[in-house]
Amino acid sequence: MHRLALFLGAAFLLVSLVAAQHAQTGQMVYEDHNNQWFEGPSGTVEISADGQWALFSRWGRAQRLVSLKTEAADPERLKSGLDSVQNAAFCGSGLARYGQRGSANGWFLSSSASAPVEGIPADAVLQCSSDASIVAFYRSGAADQGIWAGHPGDFKNYEIPGHVIGMAFSPKGDVLYGLGFRADGASSLLRINLATGALTTVATDLDASPLSSSIAVSADGTKLYLALAGPGAPNNEQRHQPDAPRWLKIYELDPATGSRRRVIQSANQDNFSPRIVSGDLYWVRNSVHSSIAILPAQGGEAKELADGFLPMWSPDGHKISYVFGGWRRADWGLDLDTAVVKLDAEGKRVSGPDILISGYHEDFPAAWSPDGRWIAYHSHRAKTAVPEYGSPDSTDDVYLRLADDVHAPEIRLTDFGWETGPAYWSPDGHTLIFSSWVKGGQPGIDKVWTITLDPRTGQVLHTDPLPLPSEIRSAQWQAWSPNGKSIALEDNQGGANRSIWIVQSDGSHARKILEYKGTTYDGLSWTPDGKAIVYGGLAEEGMQLFMVARDGGKPRQLTHVAGNLMHPMLSPDGRWIACTRIVQSQQIWKGKP
């Protein structure tokens, strides 16, 4: 395992200052603030060929079509004659959409298309030549399936090493470039001659992100623009370091030689999705600030303690563990580790941050056992420096470790996790509760599990699913009541619809106490007297903290702060709420290449 420094040295600070100065070349033409957590930085943005429109998508679903002239979303233009739209992509001067019109379902390549095109799957990432006569697509996240390209309905498959993350047509439409992320963490760029079918390797050592990102081509076809973390081959060891300067920059690449030149960068921000429009370079920048904040339990000003998210209190109320590391698209999730800070009686930080949990891949915050002997946590633990979030050589489970010894061995408690959430101790210290998807089941549906163990040895006695009524769709967050007799659940009903349920510790006697709006894994926590629950919920455009009585009724808004507050955790003495505060946006910039 690696041991990391939380703060950058003077040399990196100097580099950051230079990068910040370089970032001022260009102008921001649009900013889209969002009120989510990890979902925000993961989204993709596509700029239209004329630079007038931006299409915001997330995980293969179109979210919004925005006019860069008026800065207004245009849902009618996005829908344009279809009964429903799930996905979209710019196609020539128009818009291709995956949706439904009457009984027909599929990809409609223009608003005037009478029927969908055969042979393009629902999960396709699609792109068209400038005149829309040739279509290319790949399947999002699919490894070793390559790119399909050709005239609509007559597609040929071209092999690209790894899973495809980007592609671009030449201005004349006779050449297609494809970028593939390989299993070793490096990416390969290939040139496809669409007339002959010949494939030529342009570069094999690119440090790209495993997340999808577009490629831009200059008007004369002699320059390519793509997002890379560095000019050379990637270092998988660095992918796991929270303070590694591996934010995406825009590079200009010569397709004849493979040589590259950095043209856009900014300190601690990703720059990606380039597009050339009338000689100008457009690109997208993620601006993200995430911190641990603390405020009085009855509401008030939120004061930041440290950069990070997902706080958890120690039993004595003098320490908070949390996750730190950036949402770097090139190293998505791999760089997340757990730190701890100490607080005095007035909620002021008096130490650290210090590393508490560090290893290859993602680590979630430490939950201390009631006696302080153990910490339990979720981790995507890997034995080696894996190159991406979904690497098969990593787990996704709950682990146990002695709390006061950072070198103590990790005890793996589960072997079935899939997008596992944080673990929480029952007040008697005998049971852990956590949520997880079910392997082989429906993604995005969280089930709740309990682990009963021997608190002296850490030995697992048995693991059981918590039986819940079918009305609870996806219990993505849970919290024990102070007496251990009840469990509060945050249920994701789909979209922005959330509800809070209280069940007995065995899952019986489920009772819904509140329906509200949320945007992510919003979080909830009991007050120490067990009379109320604090939760994160949507207030107009931002996430704020609310309190509701355990018997239901009208909730009370506790905060009215800038940014978004979520993941509340009450201190053991009930005086303080620790939470995640996030201020983030996706910005569209324009400048000269």
Image (cartoon, grey):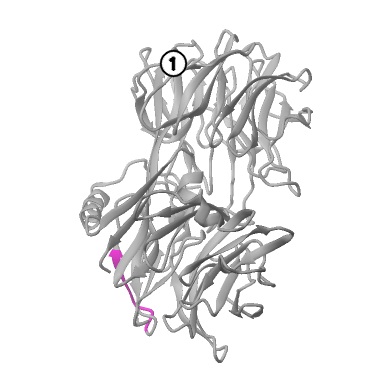
Specify whether 300 is left or right of 481: left
Determine the residue located farthest toward the bottom in the rendered image. 196
Looking at the picture, does residue 588 appear above or below residue 414? below
Residue 397, horizontal then vertical, whole percent: 65, 41
Specify whether 28 is left or right of 111: left
Q: Nearer the viewer, residue 419 or 98?
A: 98
Inspect the magenta stretch and tell me whether residue 261 lies in it: yes
Specify whether 450 is left or right of 132: right
- Which amino acid type is shown beneath numbered disc 1? Trp
Quadrant of the rendered structure where residue 559 is?
top left
Element on which disc 1 rests? strand
Residue 163, horizontal then vertical, whole percent: 58, 67
Identity of the residue drawn at 38% across and 12% down: 345
Q: Nearer the viewer, residue 523 or 149?
A: 149
Q: Nearer the viewer, residue 22 or 538?
A: 538
Inspect the magenta stretch and tell me whether residue 217 lies in it: no
Q: What count of labels does the image hold?
A: 1
In this figure, which residue is indicated by the disc labeled 1? 576
Q: Can I make out residue 385 in this image?
A: no
Looking at the picture, does residue 96 appear above or below residue 492? below
Looking at the picture, does residue 94 appear above or below residue 344? below
Residue 516, horizontal then vertical, whole percent: 58, 26
Residue 133, horizontal then vertical, whole percent: 54, 80
Q: Which residues are magenta?
A: 257-263
Image quarter of the C terminus:
bottom left
